[in-house]
């Protein structure tokens, strides 16, 4: 009898495990996302709390436990441990893409509410989401290579464009503004204007010359594409800055501009900017050039520069013009790895009005800002963290960060990645944008 009891207990436990496996397998195989992701959360939560790993990655769990339990966190670039990570529900939906994972939509730091089927693409972890449409369509691109797509909420391809895409984009009135690029041999491929610059002393076979690609968001057809360097060099102010930067940094030869962000100004922003500087049309782009520590206002109708902001930041990203009339920029601080900051700039006289800095805030690469309903969200990409800046009155007066998300302790895409300090972290963030819930129409 004793043997029979043990056998029955064993069979009972085995049947439960088989049921869980079957449900998880079918839910994943049949794309029943909410069931699969719910089970994934439960399994990973049990693994973490019991310090086990059902995928046999024992070193992953052991290392994380040892690192996050240390009182001395020197060199550990996360602001959180497993127990102190952000857990509050978001006010908006978060579209997020970690460096090594697929794009997902979340409503809390621990819950995925939608993911897109990317089985039509090879190496789907290299797919970058750029924009989420209200109906669930997603604008995506292959990471820094050729291929731009609009897919529906189920992953079906609506259109594709074979152009190259690089970094973040903007959309306005069914037009998509995309940083793209071509490659030239220096100095052989320089035109007459560029041969009269310090680029003539560069010797580089595949120098990246950035272009602006404008697509129709409904069809994916090219509306226009133009190369920036040949146009910008006609401006003497820009030419002088370029020459100075090339002389001071040989690496500029390989990537003279490095366009990492485009923002198309709307009519309200145009009116605000016109109070500060004189614009020559209502069709203005804000362009961010990382290699030159430069942001400029570009007249798309007349192909001329209206205004240049330079050397108020280092290797910057994500310039955003706010309704308060100031320009906000993510200052990476020249890849120092020590600290990053957000600078508030008055473009009327090109001065920094104020800055936001906080302890343990450093993103040597990328870094992204988002204004939504007068809230300012900051993506510290390298750290894998997102926070909101809360101020008593104006930005940046008596402000503090409220952390909303940390990818370092998320459950959905486990990995064994380590940062340069050998501190455990799950993943960095390529893009993490919030979308208002009442404007997203495809969530059940």
Image (cartoon, helix red, strand yellow):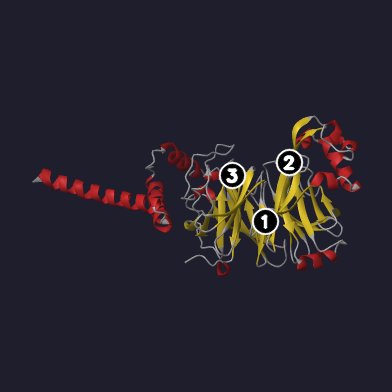
**Identity of the residue furthest to the left in this view:** 1
Q: Which mark is residue 94?
A: none
Secondary structure under badge 1?
Answer: strand
Badge 2: residue crowd in 10 Å (few <14, some 14–19, many ≥20)? few
Q: Position of residue 259 (x, y in %)?
A: 74, 47
For the image, the number of numbered tags is 3
Calculate the distance from the C-alpha at mark 2 to the C-alpha at mark 1.
27 Å
Residue displayed at 55% across by 42% down: 72
For residue 91, side relative to residue 22 (left or right): right
Badge 1: residue crowd in 10 Å (few <14, some 14–19, many ≥20)? many
The disc, 1 or 3, on the residue closer to the chain's N-terminal end is: 3
Between residue 14 and residue 313, name the one nearer to us: 14
Q: Position of residue 61 (x, y in %)?
A: 43, 41
Residue 100 seen in the figure:
no
Calculate the distance from the C-alpha at mark 1 to the C-alpha at mark 3.
20 Å
- Closest to the camera, between mark 1 and mark 3, is 1
Residue 296 seen in the figure:
yes
The residue where tag 3 is placed is 77
Badge 3: residue crowd in 10 Å (few <14, some 14–19, many ≥20)? many
The disc, 3 or 2, on the residue closer to the chain's N-terminal end is: 3
**Identity of the residue furthest to the bottom in this view:** 438
The residue where tag 2 is placed is 182
Secondary structure under badge 2?
Answer: strand
Where residue 378 sits, quadrant-wise, is bottom right
Q: Position of residue 37 (x, y in %)?
A: 42, 54
The residue where tag 1 is placed is 369
In the rendered view, would you say 258 is above or below 305? above
């Amino acid at each position: 009898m004793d043997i029979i009891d043990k056998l029955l207990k064993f069979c009972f436990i085995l049947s439960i495990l088989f049921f869980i496996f079957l449900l998880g397998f079918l839910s994943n195989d049949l794309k029943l996302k909410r069931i699969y992701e719910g089970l994934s959360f439960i399994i990973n939560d049990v693994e973490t709390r019991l310090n086990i790993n059902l995928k046999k990655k024992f070193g992953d769990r052991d290392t994380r436990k040892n690192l996050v339990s240390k009182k001395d966190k020197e060199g550990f670039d996360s602001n959180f441990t497993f127990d102190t990570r952000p857990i509050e529900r978001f006010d908006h939906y978060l579209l997020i893409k970690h460096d090594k994972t697929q794009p997902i939509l979340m409503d809390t730091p621990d819950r995925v509410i939608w993911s897109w089927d990317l089985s039509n693409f090879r190496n789907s972890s290299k797919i970058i989401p750029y924009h989420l449409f209200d109906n669930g369509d997603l604008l995506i691109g292959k990471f820094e290579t050729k291929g731009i797509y609009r897919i529906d909420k189920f992953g079906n391809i609506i259109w594709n464009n074979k152009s190259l895409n690089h970094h973040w984009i903007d959309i306005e009135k069914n037009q998509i503004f995309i940083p793209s690029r071509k490659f030239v041999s220096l100095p052989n491929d320089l035109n007459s204007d560029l041969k009269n610059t310090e680029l003539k002393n560069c010797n580089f076979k595949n120098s990246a010359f950035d272009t602006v690609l404008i697509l129709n968001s409904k069809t994916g057809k090219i509306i226009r594409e133009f190369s920036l360097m040949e146009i910008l060099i006609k401006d003497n102010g820009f030419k002088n800055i370029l020459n100075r930067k090339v002389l001071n940094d040989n690496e500029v030869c390989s990537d003279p501009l490095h366009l990492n962000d485009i923002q198309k100004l709307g009519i309200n922003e145009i009116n605000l900017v016109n109070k500060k500087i004189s614009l020559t049309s209502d069709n203005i782009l804000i362009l961010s050039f990382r290699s030159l520590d430069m942001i400029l206002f570009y007249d798309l109708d007349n192909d001329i520069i209206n205004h240049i902001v330079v050397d108020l930041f280092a290797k910057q990203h994500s310039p955003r013009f706010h309704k308060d009339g100031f320009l906000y920029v993510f200052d990476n601080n020249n890849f120092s790895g020590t600290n990053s900051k957000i600078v508030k700039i008055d473009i009327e006289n090109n001065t920094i009005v104020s800055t936001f800095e906080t302890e343990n805030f450093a993103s040597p690469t990328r870094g992204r800002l988002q204004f939504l309903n007068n809230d300012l969200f900051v993506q510290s990409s390298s750290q894998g963290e997102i926070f909101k800046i809360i101020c008593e009155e104006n930005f940046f007066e008596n402000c503090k960060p409220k952390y909303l998300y940390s990818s370092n302790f998320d459950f959905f895409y486990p990995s064994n990645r380590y940062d340069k300090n050998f501190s455990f972290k799950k993943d960095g963030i390529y893009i993490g944008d919030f979308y208002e819930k009442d404007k997203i129409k495809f969530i059940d």
